Amino acid sequence: MRIHTGDKPFKCEHCNYICRDNRDLKRHIFVHIGEKPCKSGICDYKFARSSDVRRRMMAHTQKTPFKCEIYDHMSATSCSLKKHMMVHTAVKPFKYKECDYMSATISSLKKHMLVHDGKKLFKCEVCDYKSARSNNIKNHMLVHIAVKDFKCEVCDYMSATNSSLKKHMLVHTREKTFKCEVCDYMSARNSDLKKHMLVHTGEKRFKCEVCDYMFARSSDLKKHMLVHTRKKTFKCDVCGFMSTRTSGLKNHMVVHGETCDYISATSSNLKRHKMLTCAVEKPLKCEACDYMTNTNSNLKRHIRIHTKEKPFKCKICDHLYATSGDLRRHVMTHTGEKPFKCEVCDFICTRNYNLKKHMMVHTGEKPFRCEVCDKMFRDSHDLKRHILIHTGEKPFKCEVCDYMCIFNSGLKKHMMIHTGEKPFKCEVCDKMFRGSTDLKRHILVHTGEKPFKCEVCDYMCTLNSRLKKHMLTHKGE
């Protein structure tokens, strides 16, 4: 009769969950106490409910018989399909009284209510991360255990799940109907356009109480707070180095010449990883310089530095590149795509490698050490370039004048003095620049943003170099 009357007398003591039956309440309690009595017969996964086991079994058998007629979505149950269909129908009958949030399901509304309650009942078993939703914990666990075997064919994005890769592919395939009125930015979602508009308005309403860092979105502030609260739980057994992430520890272990904890679903992927990352022996040597590698493809790419061969051509602006990867990243300068976003701040980039390197700015990790001056670096390439300062070597020479430099990027930028090329254009005032970093600094003139702040007084500026000069005025105080 409770089905007809709607009576739900059984309430969870830990959260707002209520139900009609005592058995349902007992099953729900498993979520909080961590007990998982139901085990999958194929893998080692355990679950609190038998229904979760059935869904897991479908993942093994790949049975997803219920298909969406509008989109490519497949579901294991008719109930899941019905919930998915609400995405297309835009029916959201459940509304929260405290804010404008609306949901297609009562379960989503209950989860949203936890955000207002401030309760974070679910905790990561590896680190101190907590969340109000169990799904967030599951997604977070991928940071600790996931092997990213799903790769985007367009850019360098890699994912631990096929579903995440599908979502990412929308960046490349979905029609961009929402256009910025200030610049040429276009987006597939109105929410992304709203976030982008903050670049022009410069509005940052959310402030960190620890370091005064300002953010445009509350979600970015929450992610930033992990910098202050997250513990360094991953420790090097050789020297005691500690990191907040497994990836940071793995990068550090290269210093000791150790192999890493990489795991793969296939032996071929493992062999390739060993060759590229962990193998000490590099039998293939460049005849023009001291470069050594363990793959023929890497050697071929390197040789193009000496031969200046650039077989890959951009169809939009006729620029030539030595590798297909360089061409793909260049094309993103035309399309405006930057699929890799920092979870702590507003930094976005075209390469997963650059994102990983950027994350070390927040974590403070610098696992690579110079043996000459003890200076620490976030990246092995940065260390190699730094070593050239001690050796005095300047391998990159201009063919027009006597200019020599340590970095190939420096030579490319220098060559633009001779060619007059300025490929980077400001979309606000049409001013042209030789480098993307020059353009980024210039954009701050329009946004009014001054990210570099003096710790002694209220002085703020757009360039780090200006802040360093300013700091000299405080010497002797």
Image: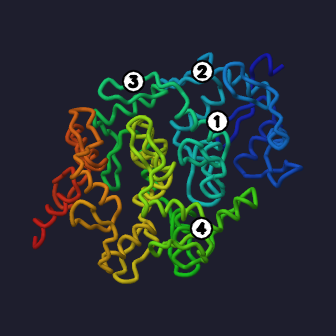
Mark number displayed over residue 16? 1
Percent of width and height locating residue 368? 45, 73
Mark 3 or mark 1: name the one nearer the start of the chain: 1
User: Which residue is denoted by mark 3 in the rendering?
Assistant: 179
Residue depth check, mark 2 versus mark 3: number of the one nearer the observer: 3
Residue at 60%, 35% in the rendered image: 111
Callout 1: SS: loop
User: Which residue is denoted by mark 4 in the rendering?
Assistant: 277
Distance from disc 1 to disc 4, alpha carbons, whole Å, reads 49 Å
Distance from disc 1 to disc 2, alpha carbons, whole Å, reads 16 Å
Callout 4: SS: helix
Distance from disc 3 to disc 1, alpha carbons, whole Å, reads 41 Å
Percent of width and height locating residue 211? 32, 55
Is the residue marked by circle 4 packed among few (<14), some (14-19), or many (20+) residues within 10 Å?
few
The amino acid type of the residue labelled 3 equals Lys
Is the residue marked by circle 3 packed among few (<14), some (14-19), or many (20+) residues within 10 Å?
some
